[in-house]
Image (spheres, helix red, strand yellow):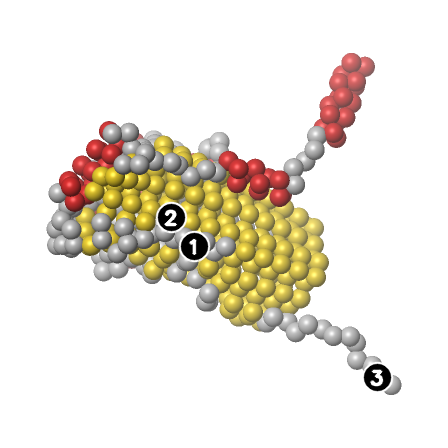
């Protein structure tokens, strides 16, 4: 007993002497780990492999595949897409050590025949692993991969794939059933006869990633999905993606991600950080963590979002120096429901400027008012130096559970100039306000003689 007591005291002394890293130290360490890949200085022009320059009627998928294979075999480099328009009937599958580089005024336009996106590939759809049509640009288990340049990647989906949104619900429900029932992934076969739209760009289980300068348009589903990825830099991108579910960037089960200097204009979440859905997500060892979002311009449906697929957990996300350039339904949004479980913690919002929103800051454990049995644990969220001009509905909403209260939420220097409803909170604990103002700033009390 005496030895056990001495051992316990020793552990207490050691734990007390362990220095806890500050948020700035954690952020600095993340940035030091994130390094863009470097490629050999050799170019492979798709026009040298049969691509028809400037002819949007020419199908160029084979030329892309040949150029990428040659680049990979030679040890890596750039696969260059010269100025002009290129119709690609089918997916572009990347390989390790390849930088797909679009020169100024180069446009890749994808065809709309679903059969061209077969055979099926292993992918994920709304947080559940399945086999489905290939994403338009796809990479699986790659190291050192990039998409760069001043060109445009156009999904051409507004009159084709986007119409599947209205007929996807049976397949959406089936995928979730397979998740909840632990159906082996190899048996989760979608594709022909099903209506789950493919992503525009998906990198799956890849590391050392760079995506910069390109413009993304008219995506069939999510625009950029980083699934189980590590060490990724995304910068100076721009968007014109107005279809349903056109999320801008979705890191999922991913870590050490830098998202900076992006011009968002997409009709769903600008950034949505995810970590799997429900039973399958809860079984995963690694969620999403160590993500920095900075110096971005926000425009779309929602600004910065955590969830709702977050069952494996989301931790250490830093959002700073971002501003809205137009209306957002919700500015800063953390969402889960009791199907999810999991944990969201250590999320830092700093120096954010919002214009008109429906809700400025919203944390909910009741997303879509569905689910039971697996309440999420949401805690330690820090909101510092946030300004919002107008909230047509709510300034601040926080919704927890009696059994899993949302706790330790810190607001500092937050101003919402106008809001229909200032604050709504249920099942919360330790919500701290410092220098919070909603509505007209009160002056000194009037003096009545």
Residue shown at 70% from the left, 54% from the top: 432
Where residue 250 sits: x, y (%)? 41, 47
Where residue 216 sits: x, y (%)? 32, 54
Say if 94 sits above or below 8 in the image: below
Residue shown at 34% from the left, 41% from the top: 146
Q: CA distance from mark 1 to mark 3?
A: 53 Å
Q: Quadrant of residue 403?
A: top right
Residue that lies at the very extreme toward the front in this rendered image: 41
Residue that lies at the very extreme toward the right in this rendered image: 449
Q: Which tag, 1 or 3, sits closer to the chain's start? A: 1
Q: CA distance from mark 3 to mark 2?
A: 62 Å
In the picture of the structure, the residue carrying the numbered disc 2 is 212
- Looking at the picture, tell me which residue is in the foreground, 21 or 435: 21
Residue shown at 59% from the left, 64% from the top: 387
Asked if labels 2 and 1 touch by Cβ distance under 8 angstroms, the answer is no
- Looking at the picture, tell me which residue is in the foreground, 256 or 267: 256
Element carrying mark 1: loop
Query: Does residue 120 appear anywhere in the picture?
Result: no
Residue density around tag 3, few if under 14, some if 14–19, many if 20 or more, within 10 Å: few
Q: Quadrant of residue 8?
A: top right
Residue density around tag 1, few if under 14, some if 14–19, many if 20 or more, within 10 Å: many
Q: Which tag, 1 or 2, sits closer to the chain's start? A: 2
Element carrying mark 2: strand
Residue that lies at the very extreme toward the bottom in this rendered image: 449
Element carrying mark 3: loop
In the picture of the structure, the residue carrying the numbered disc 1 is 262
In the picture of the structure, the residue carrying the numbered disc 3 is 448
Residue shown at 74% from the left, 29% from the top: 17
Image quadrant containing the N terminus = top right
Image quadrant containing the C terminus = bottom right
């Amino acid at each position: 007993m005496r030895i056990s007591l001495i051992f316990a005291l020793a552990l207490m002394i050691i734990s007390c002497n362990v220095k806890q890293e500050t948020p700035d130290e954690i952020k600095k360490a993340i940035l030091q780990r994130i390094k863009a890949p470097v490629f050999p200085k050799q170019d492979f022009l798709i026009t040298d492999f049969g691509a028809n320059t400037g002819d949007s009627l020419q199908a160029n998928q084979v030329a892309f595949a040949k150029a990428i294979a040659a680049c990979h075999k030679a040890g890596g480099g750039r696969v260059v897409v010269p100025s002009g328009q290129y119709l690609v009937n089918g997916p572009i599958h990347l390989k390790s050590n390849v930088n797909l580089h679009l020169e100024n005024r180069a446009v890749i336009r994808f065809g709309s025949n679903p059969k061209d996106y077969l055979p099926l590939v292993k992918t994920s759809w709304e947080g559940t692993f399945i086999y489905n049509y290939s994403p338009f640009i796809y990479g699986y288990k790659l190291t050192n991969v990039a998409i760069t340049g001043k060109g445009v990647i156009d999904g051409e989906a507004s009159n084709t794939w986007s119409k599947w949104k209205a007929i996807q619900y049976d397949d959406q429900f089936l995928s979730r059933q397979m998740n909840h029932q632990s159906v082996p992934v190899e048996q989760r076969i979608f594709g022909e006869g099903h209506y789950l739209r493919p992503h525009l760009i998906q990198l799956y289980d890849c590391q050392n990633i760079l995506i910069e300068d390109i413009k993304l348009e008219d995506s069939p589903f999510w625009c950029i999905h980083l699934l189980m990825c590590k060490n990724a830099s995304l910068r100076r991108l721009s968007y014109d993606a107005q279809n349903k579910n056109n999320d801008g960037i979705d890191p999922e089960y991913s870590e050490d991600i830098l998202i900076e200097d992006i011009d968002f204009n997409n009709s769903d979440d600008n950034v949505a950080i995810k970590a799997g859905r429900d039973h399958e997500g809860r079984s995963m060892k690694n969620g999403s963590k160590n993500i920095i979002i900075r110096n971005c311009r926000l425009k779309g449906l929602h600004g910065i979002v955590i969830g709702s697929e977050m069952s494996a957990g989301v931790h250490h996300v830093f959002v700073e120096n971002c501003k809205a350039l137009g209306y957002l339904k919700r500015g800063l949004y953390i969402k889960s429901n009791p199907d999810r479980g999991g944990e969201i913690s250590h999320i830092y919002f700093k120096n954010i400027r919002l214009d008109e929103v429906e809700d400025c800051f919203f944390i909910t454990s009741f997303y879509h008012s569905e689910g039971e049995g697996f309440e999420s644990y949401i805690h330690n969220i820090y909101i510092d130096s946030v300004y919002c001009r107008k909230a047509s509905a709510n300034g601040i909403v926080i919704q927890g559970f009696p059994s899993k209260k949302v706790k330790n939420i810190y607001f500092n220097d937050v101003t919402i100039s106008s809001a229909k409803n200032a604050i709504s909170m249920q099942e919360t604990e330790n919500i701290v306000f410092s220098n919070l103002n909603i509505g007209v700033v009160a002056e000194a009390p009037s003096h009545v003689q």
